[in-house]
């Protein structure tokens, strides 16, 4: 590959010339979208890099990045790479000792922290991280009183850098020139579903090649607009708002704060958008809820035209032929409903949207596609620099994740596990040879840990984590995740946990969606004081029962999974919560922990009792601990006989 | 006494008499403003309307004759000889009460706690409406009003005052119109009655309570609505009286509604909320403008009454922004 | 003679001093022979039971009331009789006991109005807008946006303040006073009618203001706890007379003060 | 429903605080202006000029002026008629004295003269507030009208006591007098009104406008945070009278052609303009136009219906019209005291959120 642009610093210089006056980055700050062109951004980054150099930053030093999506933090990544260092973005919402593990493990010498809050965390764990030498902060608010001997204000550091550049004009250029594609570009720590996070080591080639391939696959241009709101530590954000942005040269936009993302999304109106299924799910839920308050006429209009859209929209998007009448109706609907709706959601300009990480509900998927939003699924993981399979335009199916990404080979192992190989395949796990060997074999095949198979249309279908795929006592396959997803497709079910491994039949925990169910309660004036009370309401149980029966029906129709029909379930008295370790930061279910925590309940599900008492420790927003008690009803669900394939 | 002096005296007396008329109209404003905080611009038109109605009843006109004729091509005029003055007045009073009721029902109750300026504009709207309504109902032509009040110069006063003049200066004596005197008399009577009413009747006390604070009024046990109706009715009567006087003096016609404009300076002078203020203010202005016209007006080309009252009030305000008897405005942070 | 507080803030020379102020309305004496000073960079509290004349004192300082006797010295100069807006131009900003925001305007406009003393382009440029007027507008907008950010009221930037809840209105009013970038900030019961959380925020803001911008602050407050935590020195008024003056501790243990407060049953 | 704001974001303060921040609004306004300037002149005829367009423009100008004083600075004035008279007579004297003077200059000078008069009559506002002030302003109304009646110098000793506009040309085309073609007078007024509407907007969105609104919303607080009441109020009176003066000049020179104090500038006119801004919306530039449109077009409409269709006698129609206007005004004040502008604001919000209710 062209070694002019085989590292990000080189790409930066290149863009700064080709797209000098084109906006590279925006941030909603002080009421307007502050903008930086590629040229300006280069200068900022170089100033920072020189500043770091002035602090004695050495090749191979690690620099941790702690904070939400801020331009200066993104600059931190590239500045580090300029000096041949390794950036280590960290999940900023993780608690101090989780952070401490990552920083210590990564041997971070430098830290760029967003604000006082993050700096405080750093200072708290400093003594346990011997390598940590310098902390640079972005927002000076409240930092005045701090001891500044190893604390640096971002701007001051840049000034320092500019002076350093005066003294050593070509230091930086040399440093950049030394870098090459095979060098380490970044550590991305996976929030491991089990055990401690692993540091995935990526080379420039990994990121840049993957970014380039995928950009070509979707014809991304320098005119895209992206909203960068997902954690910087997550590989997805690193690809979508860093890798692809540098490769294609498009602009990324940082929201004002976590709380204003919706408004910022609406203002920016991205052309290229990634979100995990639950985000799209939330959007749909809010749309439905807000429409409930609308006037009769509006509602009728909305329902009618959404009907039209379901009938026509998807076809139009897939370029299939539709009758003139439908086209005309859709056009009318577009004026009256779709376009305004997209406008309020911020999707007016959207050209391409991706979702991944979890399976997405068909009706959610279709809702957006029928509006003319080209939302597609991809299947990926950190170790692959995201892309393993992706859906080509026009071949979109809700239940499959598409065909192998360009340059990637995918095969299914005998045990049903999905394996892949390609340019994005990670270098290694940092300081964890064994894990590396377990995951990546000699020929470079990576074990995804997911069970799946290629459907007859050549698209990959993921069932579940291979290690979660269990067997019922009768030996038939039990795929909890698959069942849980089917449950979670219902708007009023937020989380679900299915059990059945080495049991006779399948059972489930349900978490209701407070927003959706709460709204339902309001409309049917069901009074409730707390989440717990609402969850315990018999009418809510009935609602869940109906949904579960529906799931059973669909399961019955699948010969592989007909035994997985849910026989009994209960509604949990509290929301499963990352802070209680029940979910990962990316909201994946931690089965082991849940199994331990709620053992009594699981037993109750199988010993036929009608109710069960439970007392649980909880962590509140402010970190205080407490306990809640509840007596949970357990309900039996009618099941159907398996439908024979013939039928 | 020298004729000049006597002339001045004459001017003053006439000024006082005119002033009483101003006070009379101002009174209507004050009543409503005190009770409902509404600055009722329509007061003048109410006088016109009352006068029109009265004349209509007296002469037995058919209401809306003009309209009916236009639409149905009929030629209606009157339904008979008309009512004796006394009944006509009673009937007119009834009409004014009805009017007060309707105003409260249709307009006021929708306007509770609106900005004063909005209320004010509403009453201007009301004025327009009533003017159009009155004209449609009774026709816009100028009518003469005769309720049997004395009028013309008072000869004995003339002869009496003629005597005061110094010998030899064949001074004709002062001219005083009987009508003005009568009007003044009635106005004074009305004020007395009103004062007694507000002092010694339950309703009257309630009214005063409202003026001080609306909550208090409710505790007195009379609904604000009722009170408003009462107040507007009273204002209606006052308007009727004023209408009669001015009507009798210079015919019943549109210009009658302009007496409202005469009353305004009286109000700022006397203060929106003070009945004595209205009276004293009226007298000051009456005398003031007459004197000014007599002494300086001529040099300025006359007709200074149009504005003198206002300019007087204006300068007065510069030194006492809350008017003669109005409550003091205390500024706080 | 700059001294340091234990939390490392600098306290400078006397910024404002009132000498033997006596203020009367008609016959009633609101203030009798009051004297005290406010030093650069400190947080000064004025406390006292209701009707002690605290607000009157503030109104004297901000030039709204003109005392019959006594002098006000600001930045080393005796202040002649002044209209309130002239006082404001000297660099004294304030908030009011019962919020006095401009209800018809947005949060942003309220804050911009707070900077009115610093804006000067003449009416003709204003009419033209493009050019000096717009440049000035933007320059001040940038300053105001810093304050909006500082107070965390971005979300209500363009909302008419009339529609805001009480707590936020208080915050906006503080913002308007901050916008003036005054030397001396007078806060008249900044926490009146707030819930605990709002009070904590407000305390935080007051301390930050004093720390970040080094603004001198004089505040009236009923909540003793708040006063004692916040202020460097406290002056106690009662029935228009000065009861005590000193550090929170001195004041707390002053018998006269205790008496007065037990008197009104706090 | 028609708004597509997503993607229409602001990267600078000047963009953020421009006159029409929303793209669609901007385009619509440009469209309307283009139509008014480039199309209407070719369609206009005498009837439309004299009974619809000119009155609308003239009164819109007056409404702008009064709205600045009453709507933005909170000082109620009933002297509008008087100030219009000042504008008219100033215009007349200037036209006669300097025949060569460009008509635009004349009108603007007339405005300036009125502004000075306005300041004088505004002085009381420093002591007097609210209704007292409102009534006090009537003094100027009556005094001025009386003045122009009584002092022959103002109407150049003409026997009738009326003033009538001599013919003046602009680029060789008569703009005043009987010969002036409709499109010329129309374009003349349109240009003035457009320019000064924008100027008014610039004033109210900047420092001066804020000082006015501060005085309006809470004068004491305003003074304590540094707004000099004298400057604020008098500047409001000056600017307001300036606009009203110009409208008076336009009313006389371009619309009526001749004028006489009592009928043309009587107290009724003062009320009319006050109605315009209240029905249109206090403190809103747009409102001034809506109000002016409503109160100039509606009578025309009513007349057309009653006289034109039903063939009723004019006097009857006049009374009915009076009655209806009075009723309509009351109706409006009851249903939407904040005026048409507010009505529009609400509708717009709904359109922006469409299909959601809120």
Image (cartoon, rainbow, N blue to C red):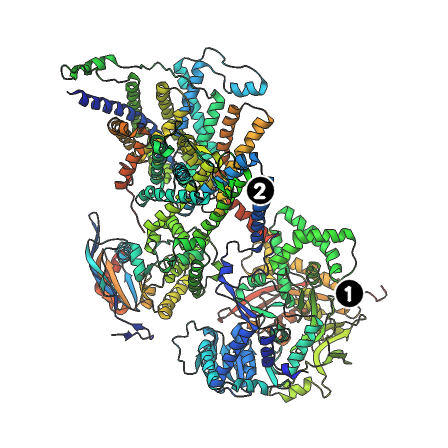
- The chain identifier of the residue carrying mark 1 reads A
Q: What residue is rendered at 70% in x and 82% in y?
A: A446
Q: Quadrant of the C terminus of chain C?
A: bottom left
The residue singled out by tag 1 in the image is A556
Would you identify the image quadrant in which residue B51 lies? top left
Residue A505 visible, this angle: yes
Quick check: D73 left or right of D50?
A: left
How far from the left and from the top, in percent, is residue D269?
A: 43, 35
Is the residue marked by circle 1 packed among few (<14), some (14-19), or many (20+) residues within 10 Å?
A: many
- In space, the residues marked 2 and 1 are separated at their CA atoms by 76 Å
The residue singled out by tag 2 in the image is D41
The answer to whether mark 2 and mark 1 are in CB contact below 8 A is no
Is the residue marked by circle 2 packed among few (<14), some (14-19), or many (20+) residues within 10 Å?
A: some
How far from the left and from the top, in percent, is residue D76?
A: 39, 41
Q: What residue is rendered at 45% in x and 44% in y?
A: D102
How far from the left and from the top, in percent, is residue D94?
A: 40, 40
Q: Is disc 2 in the same subunit as disc 1?
A: no
Quick check: B200 left or right of D193?
A: left
Q: Quadrant of the N terminus of chain C?
A: bottom left
Q: Which label sits in the foreground, 2 or 1?
A: 2
C263 over B324 or under it: above or below: below
Q: Nearer the viewer, residue D225 or B6?
A: B6
A597 over A445 or under it: above or below: above
Outermost residue on the left side: it is B167
Would you identify the image quadrant in which residue A184 lies? bottom right
- The chain identifier of the residue carrying mark 2 reads D
Q: Nearer the viewer, residue A483 or A124?
A: A124
Label 1: which secondary element: helix
How far from the left and from the top, in percent, is residue A540?
A: 63, 58
């Amino acid at each position: 590959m062209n070694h002019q642009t085989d590292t990000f610093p080189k790409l930066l210089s290149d863009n700064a010339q080709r797209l000098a006056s084109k906006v590279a980055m925006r941030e909603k700050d002080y009421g307007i979208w502050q903008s930086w062109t590629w040229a300006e951004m280069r200068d900022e980054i170089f100033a920072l890099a020189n500043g770091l150099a002035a602090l004695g930053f050495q090749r191979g030093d690690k620099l941790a990045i702690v904070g939400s999506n801020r331009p200066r933090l993104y600059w931190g990544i590239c500045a580090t790479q300029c000096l041949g260092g390794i950036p280590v973005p960290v999940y900023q919402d993780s608690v101090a000792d989780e952070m401490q593990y990552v920083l210590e493990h990564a041997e971070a010498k430098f830290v760029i922290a967003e604000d006082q809050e993050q700096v405080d965390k750093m200072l708290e764990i400093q003594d346990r991280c011997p390598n940590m030498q310098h902390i640079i902060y972005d927002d000076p608010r409240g930092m005045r009183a701090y001891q500044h001997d190893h604390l640096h204000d971002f701007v001051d550091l840049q000034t320092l850098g500019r002076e350093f550049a005066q003294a050593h004009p070509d230091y930086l250029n040399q440093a950049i020139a030394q870098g090459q594609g095979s060098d380490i570009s970044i550590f991305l720590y996976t929030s491991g579903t089990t055990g401690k996070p692993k540091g995935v080591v990526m080379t420039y080639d990994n990121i840049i090649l993957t970014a380039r391939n995928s950009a070509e696959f979707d014809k991304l241009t320098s005119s895209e607009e992206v909203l960068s709101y997902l954690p910087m530590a997550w590989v997805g954000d690193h690809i979508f708002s860093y890798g692809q942005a540098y490769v294609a040269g498009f602009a990324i936009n940082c929201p004002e704060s976590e709380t204003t993302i919706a408004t910022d999304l609406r203002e920016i109106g991205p052309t290229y958008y990634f979100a995990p299924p639950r985000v799209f799910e939330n959007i749909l839920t809010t749309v439905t809820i807000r429409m409930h308050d609308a006037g009769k006429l509006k509602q009728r209009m909305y329902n009618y035209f959404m009907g039209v859209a379901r009938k026509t929209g998807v076809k139009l998007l897939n370029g299939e032929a539709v009758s003139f009448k439908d086209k005309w109706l859709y056009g009318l609907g577009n004026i009256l409903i779709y376009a305004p709706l997209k406008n309020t959601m911020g999707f007016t300009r959207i050209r391409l949207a991706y979702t991944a990480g979890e399976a997405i509900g068909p009706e959610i998927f279709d809702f957006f596609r029928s509006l003319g939003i080209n939302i597609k699924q991809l299947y990926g993981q950190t170790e692959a620099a995201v892309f393993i399979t992706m859906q080509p335009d026009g071949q979109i199916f809700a239940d499959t994740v598409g065909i192998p990404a360009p340059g990637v080979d995918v095969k299914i192992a005998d045990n049903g596990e999905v394996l892949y190989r390609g340019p994005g395949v990670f270098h290694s796990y940092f300081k964890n040879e064994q894990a590396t060997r377990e995951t990546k074999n000699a020929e470079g095949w990576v074990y995804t840990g997911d069970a799946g198979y290629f459907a007859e249309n050549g698209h990959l279908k993921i069932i579940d984590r291979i290690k979660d795929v269990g067997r019922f006592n009768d030996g038939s396959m039990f795929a909890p995740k698959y069942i849980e997803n089917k449950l979670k497709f219902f708007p009023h079910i937020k989380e679900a946990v299915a059990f059945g491994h080495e049991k006779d039949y399948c059972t489930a925990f349900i978490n209701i969606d407070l927003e959706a169910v709460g709204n339902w309660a309001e409309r049917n004036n069901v009074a409730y004081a707390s989440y717990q009370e609402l969850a315990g309401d018999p009418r809510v149980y009935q609602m869940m029962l109906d949904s579960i029966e529906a799931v059973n029906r669909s399961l019955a129709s699948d010969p592989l999974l007909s035994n997985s029909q849910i026989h009994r379930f209960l509604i949990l008295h509290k929301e499963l919560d990352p802070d209680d370790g029940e979910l990962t930061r990316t909201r994946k279910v931690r089965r082991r922990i849940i199994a331990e925590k709620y053992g009594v309940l699981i037993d109750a599900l199988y010993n036929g009792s009608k109710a069960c008492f439970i007392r649980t420790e909880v962590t509140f927003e402010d970190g205080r601990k407490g306990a809640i008690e509840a007596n949970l009803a357990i309900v039996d669900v009618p099941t159907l006989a398996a439908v024979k394939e013939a039928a | 006494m020298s004729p000049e002096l006597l002339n001045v005296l004459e001017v003053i007396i006439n000024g006082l008499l005119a002033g009483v008329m101003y006070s009379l109209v101002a009174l209507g404003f004050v009543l409503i403003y005190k009770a409902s905080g509404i600055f009722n611009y329509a007061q003048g038109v109410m006088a016109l309307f009352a006068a029109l109605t009265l004349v209509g009843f007296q002469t037995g006109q058919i209401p809306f004759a003009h309209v009916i004729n236009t639409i149905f091509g009929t030629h209606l005029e009157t339904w008979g000889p008309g009512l004796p003055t006394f009944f006509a007045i009673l009937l007119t009073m009834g009409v004014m009460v009805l009017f007060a009721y309707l105003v409260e029902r249709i307009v006021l109750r929708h306007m509770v706690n609106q900005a004063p300026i909005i209320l004010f504009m509403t009453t201007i709207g009301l004025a327009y409406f009533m003017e159009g309504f009155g004209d449609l109902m009774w026709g816009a032509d100028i009518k003469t009003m005769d309720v049997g009040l004395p009028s013309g110069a008072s000869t004995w006063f003339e002869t009496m005052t003629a005597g005061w003049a110094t010998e030899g200066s064949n001074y004709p004596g002062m001219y005083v119109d009987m009508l003005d005197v009568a009007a003044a008399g009635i106005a004074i009577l009305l004020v007395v009655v009103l004062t007694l009413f507000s002092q010694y009747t339950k309703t009257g006390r309630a009214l005063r309570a409202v003026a001080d604070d609306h909550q208090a009024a409710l505790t007195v046990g009379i609904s604000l609505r009722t009170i408003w109706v009462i107040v507007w009715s009273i204002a209606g009567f006052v308007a009727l009286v004023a209408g009669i006087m001015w009507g009798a003096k210079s015919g019943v016609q549109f210009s009658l509604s302009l007496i409202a404009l005469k009353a305004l300076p009286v109000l700022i002078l006397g203060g929106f909320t003070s009945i004595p203020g209205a009276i004293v203010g009226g007298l000051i202005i009456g005398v003031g403008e007459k004197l000014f016209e007599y002494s300086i007006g001529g040099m300025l080309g006359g007709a200074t009454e149009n504005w003198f009252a206002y300019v007087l009030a204006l300068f007065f305000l510069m030194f006492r922004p809350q008017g003669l008897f109005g409550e003091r405005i205390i500024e706080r942070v | 003679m700059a001294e340091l507080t234990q939390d490392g803030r600098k306290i400078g020379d006397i910024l404002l001093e009132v000498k033997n102020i006596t203020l009367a309305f008609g016959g009633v004496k609101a203030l009798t022979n009051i004297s005290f000073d406010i030093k650069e960079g400190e947080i000064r509290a004025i406390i006292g039971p209701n009707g002690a004349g605290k607000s009157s004192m503030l109104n004297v300082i901000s030039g709204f009331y003109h005392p019959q006797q006594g002098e006000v010295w600001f930045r080393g100069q005796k202040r002649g009789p002044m209209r309130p807006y002239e006082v404001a131009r000297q660099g004294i900003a304030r908030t009011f006991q019962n919020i006095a925001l401009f209800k018809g305007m947005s949060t942003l406009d309220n804050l911009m109005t707070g900077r009115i003393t610093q804006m000067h382009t003449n009416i003709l440029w204003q009419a033209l807008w493009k050019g000096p007027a717009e440049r000035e507008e933007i320059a001040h907008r940038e300053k105001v946006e810093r304050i909006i950010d500082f107070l965390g009221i971005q979300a209500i930037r363009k909302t008419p303040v009339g529609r805001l809840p009480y707590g936020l209105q208080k915050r906006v009013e503080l913002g308007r006073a901050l916008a003036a970038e005054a030397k001396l900030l007078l806060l008249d019961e900044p926490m009146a009618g707030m819930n605990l959380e709002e009070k904590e925020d407000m305390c935080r803001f007051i301390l930050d203001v004093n720390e970040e911008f080094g603004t001198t602050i004089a505040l009236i407050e009923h909540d003793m706890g708040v006063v004692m935590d916040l202020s460097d020195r406290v002056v106690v008024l009662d029935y228009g007379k000065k009861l005590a003056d000193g550090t929170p501790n001195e004041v707390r243990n002053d018998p006269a003060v205790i008496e007065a407060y037990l008197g009104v049953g706090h | 429903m028609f708004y597509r704001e997503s993607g229409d974001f602001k990267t600078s303060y000047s963009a953020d605080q421009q006159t029409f921040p929303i793209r669609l609004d901007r385009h619509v306004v440009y469209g309307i202006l283009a139509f008014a300037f480039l199309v209407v002149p070719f369609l206009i005829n005498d009837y439309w000029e004299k009974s619809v367009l000119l009155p609308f423009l003239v009164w819109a100008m007056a409404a702008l002026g009064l709205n600045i004083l009453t709507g933005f600075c909170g000082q109620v004035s009933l002297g509008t008629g008087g100030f219009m008279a000042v504008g008219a007579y100033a215009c007349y004297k200037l036209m006669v004295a300097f025949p060569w003077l460009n008509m635009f200059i004349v009108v603007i000078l007339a405005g300036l003269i009125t502004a000075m008069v306005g300041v004088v009559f505004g002085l009381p506002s420093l002591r007097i507030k609210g209704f007292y002030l409102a009534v006090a302003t009537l003094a100027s109304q009556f005094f001025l009208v009386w003045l122009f009646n009584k002092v022959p110098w103002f109407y150049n000793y003409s026997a009738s006591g009326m003033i009538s506009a001599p013919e003046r040309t602009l680029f060789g085309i008569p703009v005043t007098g009987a010969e002036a073609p409709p499109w010329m007078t129309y374009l003349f007024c349109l240009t003035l009104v457009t320019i000064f509407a924008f100027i008014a907007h610039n004033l109210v969105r900047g420092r001066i406008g804020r000082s006015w609104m501060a005085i309006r919303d809470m004068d004491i607080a305003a003074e304590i945070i540094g707004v000099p009441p004298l400057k604020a109020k008098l500047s409001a009176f000056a600017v307001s009278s300036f606009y009203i003066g110009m409208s008076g000049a336009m009313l006389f020179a371009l619309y009526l052609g001749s004028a006489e104090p009592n009928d043309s500038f009587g107290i009724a006119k003062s009320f009319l303009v006050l109605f315009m801004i209240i029905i249109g919306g206090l403190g809103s530039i747009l409102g001034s136009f809506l109000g002016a449109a409503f109160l100039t077009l509606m009578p025309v409409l009513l007349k057309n219906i009653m006289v034109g269709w039903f063939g009723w006698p004019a006097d009857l129609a006049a009374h009915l019209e009076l009655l209806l206007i009075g009723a309509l005004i009351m109706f409006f004040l009851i249903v939407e005291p904040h005026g048409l502008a507010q009505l529009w604001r609400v509708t717009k919000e709904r359109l922006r959120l469409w299909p959601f209710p809120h």
